[in-house]
Amino acid sequence: MANIFARSPYIIEINETGQVETKIELRLWNGSGSAPSSPQYILSKLIPATNAPATYYDLSPYIREFIEHDSLQSQPTTNGATPSAQWCNVQVKKYKRVTTSFTQVGSTLNYKGFDGYGYFEQGYNPTLSDILLPQGNYYYESTSEVGWVTVFTETVAKARWTNINTNATQLITLPSNAVRDVSRVYSGWETAGNKLELLDSSNGVLWTSYFYPKDECKYTPVQIDFVNKFGAWQREWFFKASYDSLTVDNKEYNTLPSQYPNYLQTQGQRNVFNSNGKQTIRVNTDWVDESYSETIKQILLSEKILINEKAAKINTKSTELFKSINTKMINYQLEFEYAFDTINSVI
């Protein structure tokens, strides 16, 4: 079963001898239940010409309608089910019409859909990992929730943690063919950190990352959760100085004095209404290595961001992706704007 990352187009082609028209039936649903009896969408096309019979369908816009990241799940102890709204099941049936009726082409196709994307260099219908976090070294604020790795367990069967201080290990078996959140750090090891390995059923290592605690003695770390290129929540911390700002906007109008000609000086001649504010925060990563540029790239491209679990959007639109050969000490500074008015204006 393949995964579809629906922020990039996912193209289905039908090109059969003699076809004059094609269609696809697209079934989409959330959770572990069976496919609905009726398709959500039926798409059809006549062939462009007899010497160019191929037809193409982009599934991505329809898949994205069934995925949302409106809430942040709780920290799992070892692993837990990823909320079903954050991914969807996709079933595709292809049909051709040669004469008067449609017949199915090939077998029924089944996928898992995520709100992720591939880069241009990866070509069309990119094949990305079942493990929705890049391998690497990660740092976390040791008194906070450490976060998780979202995994589709088609090939991933087990998770193994190795304590960095003691080399003690913990191994669990994951439910099969499910979308799961695996804790980055084994519960109780937050102050030590660990290596996390994801294994296949034969204990072959598919993925390895290291998670280290980091205590910042001077500044208050800022927690950032964002939906990454794989369509899953990814948690990062910006450890160094942060700066909060407030910008206020209002409308101004001229007033008539309440008494005349002996007007009240405390009343003034102008007043304001519809005053509200927008808050921004500017953060710094601390010193990072060159590979951190990929994380920065994905934050800038993300359409869903939380700052300390509050909705936000990124104001920074460009940044240099530093190379260590050019910049020996790499620090990134980003600015975010909270995605709500300071005064509650929800109606």
Image: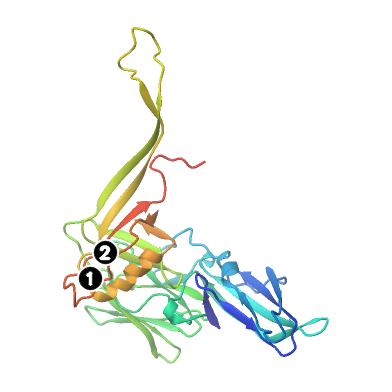
Where residue 288 is drawn, which disc sits there? 1
Which amino acid type corresponds to the residue marked 2 in the rendered image?
A: Glu
Res 141 label: 2
Side of 221 where 152 appears, left or right:
right
Q: Which disc is residue 201 wearing?
A: none
- Tag 2 secondary structure: loop
Q: Residue at x 70, y 88 (%)?
A: 16
91 sits left or right of 112 in the view: right
What is the C-alpha distance between the residues marked 2 and 1?
Answer: 15 Å
Q: Position of residue 123 (x, y in %)?
A: 47, 81
Dot placed on the residue nearer the N-terminal end, 2 or 1: 2
Quarter containing the N terminus: bottom right
Q: Residue sitting at 30 percent across and 15 percent down? A: 265
Can residue 310 be seen by looking at this rendering?
no
Task: Say if mark 2 contacts mark 1, CB within 8 Å.
Answer: no
Image location of residue 72, percent across then percent down: 44, 60
